[in-house]
Image (cartoon, rainbow, N blue to C red):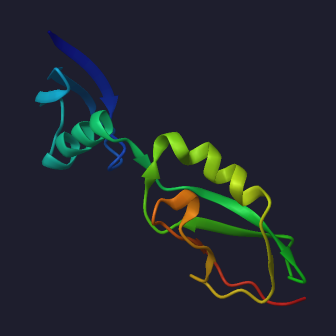
Amino acid sequence: MKSKHAFICISCPLGCSLELIEENGEVLEVTGADCKIGERYAAEEFKDPRRVVTTTVRVKGGTLPLLPVRTTDAIPKGLVVDAVRALDGVEVEAPVEDGQVICSDILETGVDVISSRELARD
């Protein structure tokens, strides 16, 4: 049986309204996209939605109390909350370099969490 799924593409500022038609888990058609990127986004979002995680971790001895961090790649959407919870208990010691690995292989996804800025020691 064919099913329809609606998505809003977040690949660019256009925010195309997409409709994906699938049957038994197989993508048959994507409409509403102004480009191929939107079509690919809808198919990926249907089959395996992923997100880049951005949050903060505590800093000991830094000029600021919190350090912005992000994943180096997208992780499965269902793991985002667990990743943020895991990072809630992390505290790094200043100084920190931009791009420094803060947490390797978060939740065994193969994706690292890195700092999004440099942070000097207080």
Indicate whether 37 appears above or below 8: below
Residue drawn at point x = 86 percent, y = 82 percent: 63
Indicate whether 3 appears above or below 120: above
Residue drawn at point x = 62 percent, y = 43 percent: 81
Residue drawn at point x = 70 percent, y = 55 percent: 86
Indicate whether 18 appears above or below 10: above
Tell which residue pokes out farthest to the top in this image.
Answer: 1
Q: Quadrant of the N terminus?
A: top left
Q: What number of labels is visible?
A: 0
Q: Position of residue 38 (x, y in %)?
A: 22, 43
Q: Nearer the viewer, residue 72 or 64?
A: 72
Whether residue 31 is visible, yes or no, is no
Tell which residue pokes out farthest to the left in this image.
Answer: 28
Residue drawn at point x = 77 percent, y = 89 percent: 95
Q: Position of residue 26 (x, y in %)?
A: 14, 29
Q: Quadrant of the C terminus?
A: bottom right
Q: Nearer the viewer, residue 38 or 52?
A: 52
Indicate whether 48 appears above or below 105: above
Does residue 1 appear left or right of residue 75 in this picture? left
Q: Nearer the viewer, residue 55 or 110?
A: 110
Does residue 58 appear left or right of residue 97 in this picture? right
Q: Quadrant of residue 119?
A: bottom right
Whether residue 11 is visible, yes or no, is yes
Q: Position of residue 70 (x, y in %)?
A: 57, 65
Q: Position of residue 20 (x, y in %)?
A: 20, 26
